[in-house]
Image: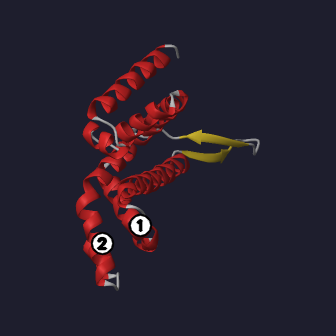
Amino acid sequence: MIFTLLMAIESEEERSFVEELYNRYHKKMLAICMGILKNQADAEDAVTDTFVRIIDNLEKFTEVEKDKLPGLIAVCTKNVALNAYQKKSRQYARETSSTVYDDEDEAVTVDFADPDAEVEQAVLDGEFIQKVAELIRRLPEEQQTVVVLKYFYHYRNGEIADLLKLSRNAADSRLFRAKNSLRKMLSEL
């Protein structure tokens, strides 16, 4: 699919830029989407949609500083995946309920059970993620940053250290303190 998108780009330089982004970030983007959507096909679609957005806004991506590009791509990917997740949740809600009328012509909403509760579980997981996100916002900013990079954008500790211009030990230490604080806050819920 990416090659079809590449052919739509007129400039050889821009085409090479997008192809380089694909080769460098595709796996991380897929990991972000899988973390949110929990479905391989949906995640792949979200990655493709992200590349469509990148191509539509190519000037923003080519002008950004090289060290900020991974973060911009991760944020864009996360937003596309979250939009897909919300769309899927709304579709599930429409498919699993229906309005019927009783004998007195009063509207009654009837919920139909979904034999495959995958979407329902995804909604529950999403609610838990929202609670955890609220707890993460309570952390000091330096701890928030490492947690988000590690668990939402799937960066390795060494990559986090490089992005934040920290030593590996400092990044590990921030992550350790953040996880301990989150465990404590979760146990108090």
Q: Residue at x 75, y 43 (%)?
A: 106
The three-letter amino acid code for the residue at tag 1 is: Phe
Q: Residue at x 30, y 72 (%)?
A: 17
For the view shown, which residue lies furthest in the bottom direction? Answer: 10
> Exactly how many numbered labels are in the figure?
2
Q: Nearer the viewer, residue 21 or 118?
A: 21
- Mark 1 burial class by Cα count in 10 Å: few <14, some 14-19, many 20+: some
Q: Nearer the viewer, residue 27 or 172?
A: 172
Q: Can I make out residue 116 in this image?
A: no
Label 2 element class: helix
Q: Contact, CB < 8 Å: mark 1 with mark 2?
A: yes
Q: Residue at x 54, y 50 (%)?
A: 90
Question: Which x, y percent locates residue 98?
Answer: 59, 47
Checking the image for residue 17, the label placed there is 2
Question: Which x, y percent locates residue 172?
Answer: 30, 29
Q: Nearer the viewer, residue 155 or 141?
A: 141
Q: Quick check: 170 left or right of 103? A: left
Q: Can I make out residue 127 in this image?
A: yes
Checking the image for residue 61, the label placed there is 1
Spatial separation of the CA atoms under disc 1 and disc 2: 9 Å
Label 1 element class: helix
Mark before the other along the chain sequence, 1 or 2:
2
Question: Which x, y percent locates residue 75?
Answer: 44, 52
Question: Which x, y percent locates residue 109?
Answer: 64, 41
Please determine whether, in this image, residue 40 is positioned above or below residue 9: above
